[in-house]
Image (cartoon, coloured by chain):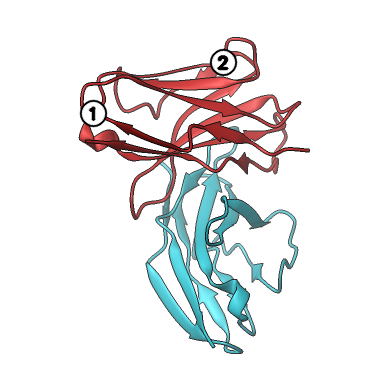
Chain colours: A cyan, B red
Amino acid sequence: AQRVTQPEKLLSVFKGAPVELKCNYSYSGSPELFWYVQYSRQRLQLLLRHISRESIKGFTADLNKGETSFHLKKPFAQEEDSAMYYCALRGLGNEKLTFGTGTRLTIIP
Amino acid sequence: GAGVSQSPRYKVAKRGQDVALRCDPISGHVSLFWYQQALGQGPEFLTYFQNEAQLDKSGLPSDRFFAERPEGSVSTLKIQRTQQEDSAVYLCASSLPGASGNEQFFGPGTRLTVL
C-alpha cells in the first residue's frame, strides 16, 4: 500500500523566514513524488516533481529515500506563498496519485 | 487553450437522489482521473480512464458510484441514491498518457452537498 503523511495541518511563518513543509511517504519501491499547490479560489496545480530537480517559485524538494521524505523548502517566505500544499506519490507502473492531507501555509506580513 | 472544465460547479442533492457530474478534459489528453476530496482531506483516487477504457476503478467507494467515458473524451461520474457521506468536492484531472512524470491537470471541481 502507498501512503503519504503530512504531519502539519497548519503552518504559519513570518515573511522572509525560511519555510519547510514536511512530507513522509510509505511505498515498497521507487515512487515519483510531487508537490501540488492550491492558492485561494484557484484549482490544484503542480508545483514541482522530484524527477525534474527544479526550483519553482524559490521552492525546492529533495527525495530522501533513506528517510522516505520529500520535504518542501524555501529559504525566504513571501506573502504570495500563502496557500494549501499537498504532497503526492505515484507508484511505479501506476497512474493514480496518492495525496497527503495537506498543509495550509500562512505567511505573516 | 482551455484547461479541464467541470460542471456543475455546485450541486445540492437530497439524500436518495441520483446525480451526474461532468468533466471535459484538455483536448488530446488520453488519461482522465476522478478524485474525491472530503472536507479537510487530500484528494482520494476514485477511477482512471485511458481513452474510453476504464483501467482502474479500485477507488470507487461503492456500487452506487459509476463512471463512464464512452467516446474517450468527456466523462461523467454518476452517484446513485446519494448519501450524506458522499458530500465532497469531486475533482477531475487529465494528462497525456504513459511515461513517467506526466503532469495531471486538475479541473475546478464540483462541490456536492447531500442534505
Q: Is residue B103 left or right of residue A81?
A: right
Asked if the residues shown at circle 1 and circle 2 are in contact, with their CB atoms under 8 angstroms apart, the answer is no
Q: Residue at x 33, y 51 (%)?
A: B39
Q: Earlier in the sequence, mark 1 or mark 2?
A: 1
Q: Is residue A27 above or below residue A92?
A: below
Q: Is residue B104 left or right of residue B109?
A: right
For discs 1 and 2, the disc positioned in front in the rendered view: 1
User: Which subunit holds the residue at mark 2?
Assistant: B
Percent across and percent down for residue A87 are: 51, 57
How far, Cα to Cα, is label 1 from label 2? 26 Å
- Mark 2 residue element: loop
Percent across and percent down for residue A57 are: 71, 70
- Mark 1 residue element: loop
Q: Nearer the viewer, residue B64 or A63?
A: B64
Residue A27 makes an appearance in the image: no
Which numbered marker is on residue B14? 1
Could you say which quadrant of the image residue B46 lies in?
top left
Q: Nearer the viewer, residue A54 or A37?
A: A37
Residue that extends furthest to the right in the rendered view of this protein: B1
